Image (cartoon, rainbow, N blue to C red):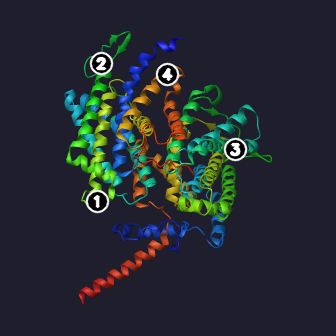
Amino acid sequence: MGGGSITTVSKNEFRKRDLFYVVPMWLLSLVLPNPVPHRKREFQKRDLIYLAILVVLPLLWRDFHFHHLMVLAGMNAISALGLSLFLGYTGQISLGHAAFFGAGAYTTALLTTQQGFPSLLAFIISAAVSASFAYVIGKPILKLKGYFLALATLGFGEIFLVIVRETPGLTGGVVGISGIPWFTFAGIVFDTYLKQYYLIWGVLIGLLIFSKNIVRSRMGRAFLAVSASEDAASTVGIPVAQTKLKAFVMSAAFAGFGGSLFASVMATASPESFSLNLSILIVMMVILGGMGNLYGPIAGAIFLTWLTDVLAGFQEYSLPLYGMIFILLLIFFPEGIGTRLGFRIVYLISYWAKKRRREKGKIE
Amino acid sequence: MTSWAYIPQLLITGVTIGAIYALVAIGFVTIARASQIINFAQGEFVMLGGVITFVLLNKGFLPYPVAALLAVLIVILIGFSLHRLVIHPLRKASLLIILMATLGASFFMSSTSNLVFGSLPKSLPPFSGSEAFHVWGISILPQSLWVFLATSLLLILLYLLSHRTFIGKAMEASSTDPMGADLVGISRDLMLLMAFGVSAGVGAIAGILITPIFYTSYNSGTLLGLKGFVAAVLGGWGKPSGAILGGFVLGILESAGIAFIPSGYKDGVAFGILLLILYFRPKGILGSPFVDSRRW
């Protein structure tokens, strides 16, 4: 386990603070997936267990707040899953995913309220719109190395917000668009949290299977190669810029799906929902879930959505606390919370054993 | 066209705000040169400079110069502690993690400022007189002159610091050749700490200069920081001269833009410029030592 990971394995030095979280880590390791890419079998028994939990849990725990939270988490998870393809697998940074999310939401909002499009069609068009934005931005920028894409997407995010705020005729300005009809498909209106839960997690599972296949495909291998070394990738004949562009467009399309669902589930779209904070949140979900992993971002999305909700209870202290927890999580889990947990625990136990033996030796 | 008549007036505004952008950009560049880190909390130093001076002046009843000096010192301490508490523990992490951590720190600072000092926009009295004087039909606020003067003085000081003092030379060395600096015994960590102090101080001074003209509230730092960053990229990422040039160019373009496009789009101008510069000349106006703009 763990040792053969493709992600750079840092030195597993023992740190004293590891002692403090060995128990929660062990508990987490029972639940969280260990993000090691290149599993031999794509779908394991574990996946069936996850699926069963997802299907049964909302029926057993009939709490509206929980359902609502999971709906939010699902929408975040869709964007985070898309970003994972781009950030985790291809190793590029985007700080503007909120704009793609927002583009999806506004497209759905406009098409359903003003043009009377059916939800499903609007859903697909939203993803296409987000993807085409990504294509236009990414095409020139992705030829460059380094951090330019992060900057360009950041700029695009801000421009998107300015345009949305300043065209009240089309987008409703600061107030936004409300009264977006519920998502309807095959005669079912998704109007309760429970129905929305199944809608969103159903879409998420579909996208997850799609991403799993992508990652296993030639293109997915190219993503990993680009992430490891752009020079080496180009040497073996991978078109680097094109590969990065594909990953970027794909992740923007995911964000568009998420945004479209956001619009038709929340029934509103306003610019505050799509600010830089959301972009940062999505990136955090991918980082905390573990890069180069598809389950991680989903776990990260659930965790951070839940954290946001818990912290909202602290009222005016919630935002400073939030910032502090962000930084602490980054300091203590820079490779993600779930990454090589089992491995770390084995290491810790062996360390303790060695330490005790050494101490005995001293006494004798 | 009436809008042309406003151009000289807007130019003055542009130079004033451009000076502030230049100072913020210098802050970015100082840290980037020491370690390649993009410190997105830079804008919060500006905000804190203005807000803390306001609080010391109005709640602490200190005389203006003392309050300003004290605020700069406090913000420098905040800069040091940002390095010690956030950047230093992450020194082995990847740049993405550090970038996210600075964003988290920026979020923390602005929301803490909201909590401690309140969310109302704050304004300081101008340094000398609020009567605008008129030259050739252009009205100039005395504070604009102060901003320009103080910025020039600060830039000269920074130049002297980096070229004429031992510590400046050490910082310069660790940015041009990190390994060589290590070999001759310059602590890169210490240099980064100094860089954080310098850029926090510069940011705070920018905040104190700008607050009498534009209001400063807890959330104005983020946008100012991002624009300062755009300025640094525009002039040439990693070059102090580029940062200054970029700041002034951005300030002038932005306020000249008001004459031709609706004022609501003002904030979009900077980011539009960012996209254009990244499309057509990613190394910026003056070129950049960090940017490998090789195309595939």
Q: Chain of mark 2?
A: B
Picture layout, residue A319 above or below residue B120: below
Tag of residue A128: 3
Q: Are marks 3 and 4 in contact (CB under 8 Å)?
A: no
Residue B6 horizontal side relative to residue A87, left or right: left
The tag earlier along the polypeptide, 2 or 1, is: 2
In this rendering, position of residue A74 left or right of residue B242:
right
| Mark 2 on the same chain as mark 1 | yes
Neighbor class of circle 3 (other Cα within 10 Å; few <14, some 14-19, many 20+) is many
Q: Sequence-wise, which precedes: disc 2 or disc 4? A: 2
Q: CA distance from mark 3 to mark 2?
A: 53 Å
Q: Is residue B29 left or right of residue B65?
A: right
Inter-mark Cα distance, 3 to 4? 34 Å
SS class of the residue under badge 3? helix
Q: Which residue is drawn at the image coordinates 55% and 49% (left, top)?
A: B295
Residue behind mark 2? B142
The residue pinned by badge 1 equals B182
Q: Position of residue A243 (x, y in %)?
A: 62, 55
